[in-house]
Image: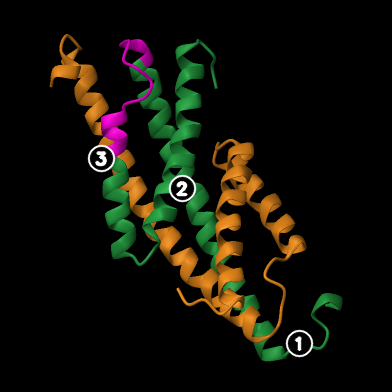
Chain colours: A green, B orange
Amino acid sequence: MSSTNGLDPEALAELHSLRESIDNVDAALIHMLAERFKFTQAVGRLKAANDMPPSDPDREKRQVERLRALAAEANLDPEFAEKWFNFVVHEVIQHHQAIANGDKD
Amino acid sequence: MSSTNGLDPEALAELHSLRESIDNVDAALIHMLAERFKFTQAVGRLKAANDMPPSDPDREKRQVERLRALAAEANLDPEFAEKWFNFVVHEVIQHHQAIANGDKD
């Protein structure tokens, strides 16, 4: 507790409780991301087998619009939701290209 | 359907089904992220009110180790999990600094 000396014990208890909740949410997020990757890997294999292009800008545009609207409803910054989505899609496209190039993951 | 002419209808039906699942997972992810931000904003307010520093490298190190282990169990690339976590934490720290500076969000 050396880094917490002198701090209000109630504030520390509250911090501990909030961190437990964050850890619970993060575990859920990691598992949902794992499930998302299973689906996008299946899409990648399907696209590679059928000579479809790895990325689909029209689909991505619709996804961004939808996620921004969902974020706004949930009181999450739509700009953050869009940046977050672009980060995840960037990773997915790299995976698709690896599959199209014959790499196995 | 101009962009899908000549493609196998079964492959297109499979693509459609996978995309529905991805959209469902994304809606869940956005709502979990919204919940995560509610908790981290509460942490930000608590830290600002108690003069705690906005970032906590020891806590973040433990979080990264835990999330990498959870990712490995769920068959998600731990490197991706870590990059994803750093992306989210970077956003959170910006929010905390804004709260500490007296901005309201």
Image side of residue B18 versus residue A18, left or right? left
Residue marked by disc 1:
A7
Placement of the C terminus of chain B among the 4 image quadrants: bottom left
- Under circle 3, the secondary element is helix
* Above or below for B8 versus B76: above
Determine contact: label 2, label 3, CB under 8 Å.
no
Give the magenta range. Answer: A48-61
Q: Earlier in the sequence, mark 2 or mark 3?
A: 3
Spatial CA span between label 2 and label 3? 15 Å
Q: Earlier in the sequence, mark 1 or mark 2?
A: 1
Does the magenta run of residues contain A50? Answer: yes
Question: Is residue A20 among the parts visible in the rendering?
Answer: no
Disc 1 crowd rating (10 Å Cα; few below 14, some 14-19, many 20+) is few
Q: Quadrant of residue A50?
A: top left
- Under circle 1, the secondary element is loop
Indicate which disc residue A44 carries.
Answer: none
Does the magenta run of residues contain A87? Answer: no
| Image label count | 3
**Mark 3 or mark 1, whichever is nearer to me:** 3
Image side of residue B65 versus residue A102, left or right? right
* Above or below for B87 versus B17: below
Amino acid type, callout 1: Leu
* Above or below for A92 versus A5: above
Chain ID at mark 1: A
Residue marked by disc 2:
A84
Disc 2 crowd rating (10 Å Cα; few below 14, some 14-19, many 20+) is some
Residue A100 % position (x, y): 45, 13
Q: Are marks 2 and 3 on the same chain?
A: yes
Indicate which disc residue A62 carries.
Answer: 3
Chain ID at mark 3: A
Q: Measuring 50% from the left and 61% from the top, which residue is drawn there? A: A25
